[in-house]
Image: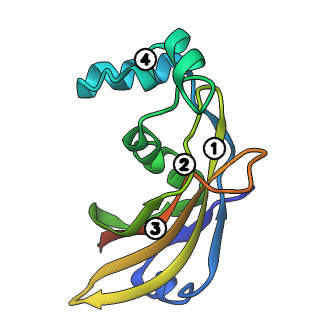
Amino acid sequence: MSKVTINSLADFAALEGEELGVSDYLKITQKQIDKFAEATLDFQWIHTDPERAKKESVFGGTIAHGYLTLSVLPYLWDQIIEVNNLKMQVNYGIEKFKYMEAVRAEDEVRLKVKVASIKDLRGICKAEMKITLEIKDRKKPAYIGSVLFLYHFE
């Protein structure tokens, strides 16, 4: 898969309404979940205790923190798009976001992105992207929503 290349606000505007692509799959491991728990101090057993989760959870094992699945967004996003001629990129917001399905330890996920809208804010590109985090071999996605980025082109 080749990345979509953006060199200017006009390049982004030309893609409004278009699907940009899909990332490769990324496996979410128990080790990654445990490290996320350490970083965020969220040690709820549903994430960090595989034996208990196997016995007591409706998921049959541990699940990734919802915010962990959101935090891999930049890594997956970078596989889809390359933005050049930037002074700075800023995460601006998350809107209409909904978790749909738990990501279990060892599940593989990938990001699907569509350009919802592009706005010119006095030379700064405000990009709204519709995102879906798909789970391999599952019908329901992990989440859907919109993320907003500000791209300050040179």
Q: Residue at x 32, y 79 (%)?
A: 126
Residue on which disc 1 sits: 109
**Amino acid, disc 2:** Leu
Q: Which residue is mark 2?
A: 76
Q: Earlier in the sequence, mark 3 or mark 2?
A: 2
Q: What element does badge 1 sit on?
A: strand
The amino acid type found where label 3 is placed reads: Gly
Q: Which is more toward the observer, 42 or 86?
A: 42
Q: Which residue is mark 3?
A: 145
**Marks 4 and 2: CB-CB under 8 Å?**
no
Task: Residue 39 in the image: state x and y as whole percent.
Answer: 27, 24
Considering only vertical position in the picture, is 50 above or below 46?
above
Residue 144 image position (x, y, % from top left): 51, 64
Q: Which residue is mark 4?
A: 48
Q: Amino acid at mark 1?
A: Val
Given residues 7 and 96, the one toward you in this image is: 96
Query: Are circles 1 and 2 on residues that touch, CB within 8 Å?
Result: yes
Estimate the x, y position of residue 152 in percent, counting from the top left: 27, 72
The residue carrying pointer 1 sits among few (fewer than 14), some (14 to 19) or many (20 or more) residues within 10 Å by Cα, namely many
Q: Earlier in the sequence, mark 3 or mark 4?
A: 4
Identify the residue shown where x is 79% and y is 45%: 137
**Residue 94 position in % (x across, y down):** 33, 65
- Distance between mark 4 and mark 2 Cα atoms: 24 Å
Q: Secondary structure at mark 2?
A: helix
Q: CA distance from mark 3 to mark 2?
A: 15 Å
Which tag, 1 or 2, sits closer to the chain's start? 2
Could you tell which of marks 1 and 3 lies nearer the N-terminus?
A: 1
Mark toward the start of the polypeptide (1 vs 4): 4
Considering depth in this image, is 144 or 117 the residue closer to the camera? Answer: 144
Residue depicted at 47% across the width and 73% down the height: 129
Q: Residue furthest right?
A: 137
Asked which secondary structure carries label 3, the reply is: strand
